[in-house]
Amino acid sequence: MTGHLTQSSCSTCGADVFAEDNFCRNCGAEIVRLDARRKTHQTFARADRRVPLGAFLAFFGGIVGFLSYLMGIVPMLALGLAAFLVGIMILYLHESESIPGSVATDSILSLLLNIENLLGDLDLDEKGIYIPASGLGASPKVFVPLALTPATMSPSLGLSQSHGVFVTVGKNPEDRGILLDAPGAGIMTALERSLRLDLAKARFEDLKVDLDSGFKALGIGRVVSLGRGDATVTVEIELTALVELETKLRNLAPRVSAYIGTPIASAVAASLSKATGRYVMMKNADFDLPNRRISITVQLSE
Amino acid sequence: MKNVHVFFIVYATLAFSTVFALSLLSEERIDVYMALFAVEFFVASELTSPLTSTQQRRKNIVGVIMLVIFVGIVVERVLEILGR
């Protein structure tokens, strides 16, 4: 097996780097590979072509339409008008990114690394429990217990309104943990806003369609499948964005990724908690990088 | 593919197909083309919603303009019929 892996070394710290890694597991430095750089240029070129395309269509349509109007050729006038309309829509409806994706990723990463350090210092080894919330824009909080006890497995729903970090949910010393805003809270809120739907009022049967529409509208990806088992739900998402963040977090913040979830996985868990009105615990969130697919399995409990 | 890109492709396909079809039928009234462009805009919008909030807002503005044009064409036709 080791014959398939080619090793190189990180130029920053000199640690070994495997062929499939995009980041040094020792110091976190990004490893830029030639094919990734080419892909970045291609993406940039593709984004750049929208404005010239829209401008060309609008200009072409305007010229053809004007000349056709002067010559009295109605079909050509209509062609010019159609091209002009399409060009104007490409220019007007296209929404440029307000902040480069890599800057947004790095900003989110540093915040989640703080949580990773917090979990490490407190030596918390239990999976986070999403507490259901209701109301448009309200996002479930995630409770990471010190230990799994009857009290910590079903923390009070009132914790959703709590602003504290270190909380006690029972009489015993083990009935404690930390209460965090879900990493995917912002994504979940954006989903609700784009769908104009309070997920607490959504039917579970429509959830796949709702989440699929929402993720597509946000430009994050699409929901491939959503299946329900006895007490588990599995959601598979094909990502069109945030792939870099997913990869980085799995390398640099394994506890956050496994116990609470990356922003995408957390958004899905929060959405499921809100839609079902039940506690949701992350079971696993496997990321298939070559296919850009993330498979999230959560456990539901009353 | 993002919804907005699908919208551009769907609307461009519908609009250029309309021009091709109506020119084969030798249609000489420009308001027929315009009315169909307006209808196709709403069809493409419904097929490719939802968009992001900014795009939705801008699309609504374009939709209002299209609606005004369409209503204007309809009113002109109605007045023409009533005038006879």
Image (tube, rainbow, N blue to C red):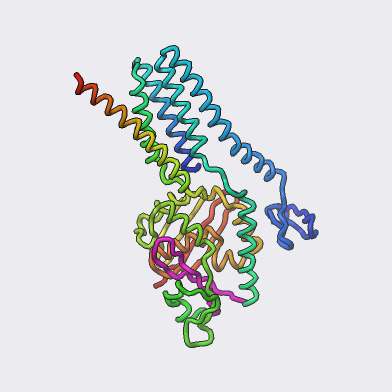
Residue drawn at 23 percent across, 26 percent down: B78
- Pick out the residue farthest to the top: A71
Residue B70: horizontal and vertical position, in percent? Answer: 33, 31
Residue A130: horizontal and vertical position, in percent? Answer: 47, 69
For residue A156, side relative to residue A95 (left or right): left
Span highlighted in magenta in the image: A123-147
Image quadrant of residue A204? bottom left
Quarter the C terminus of chain A occupies: bottom left
Residue A11: horizontal and vertical position, in percent? Answer: 79, 55
For residue A92, side relative to residue B45 (left or right): right
| For residue A132, above or below residue A81 | below
For residue A126, side relative to residue B18 (left or right): right
For residue A81, side relative to residue B28 (left or right): right
Quarter the N terminus of chain A occupies: bottom right
Q: In this view of the protein, which residue sits in the foreground, A243 or A289?
A: A243
Q: In this view of the protein, which residue sits in the foreground, A194 or A263?
A: A194
Residue drawn at 67 percent across, 45 percent down: A36
> Residue A292 colored magenta?
no
> Which secondary structure dominates the residues rendered in magenta?
loop
| For residue A36, above or below residue A144 | above
Residue drawn at 76 percent across, 54 percent down: A7
Residue drawn at 59 percent across, 52 percent down: A243
Residue A211: horizontal and vertical position, in percent? Answer: 43, 54
- Counting the numbered discs, the total is 0
| For residue A2, above or below residue B65 | below
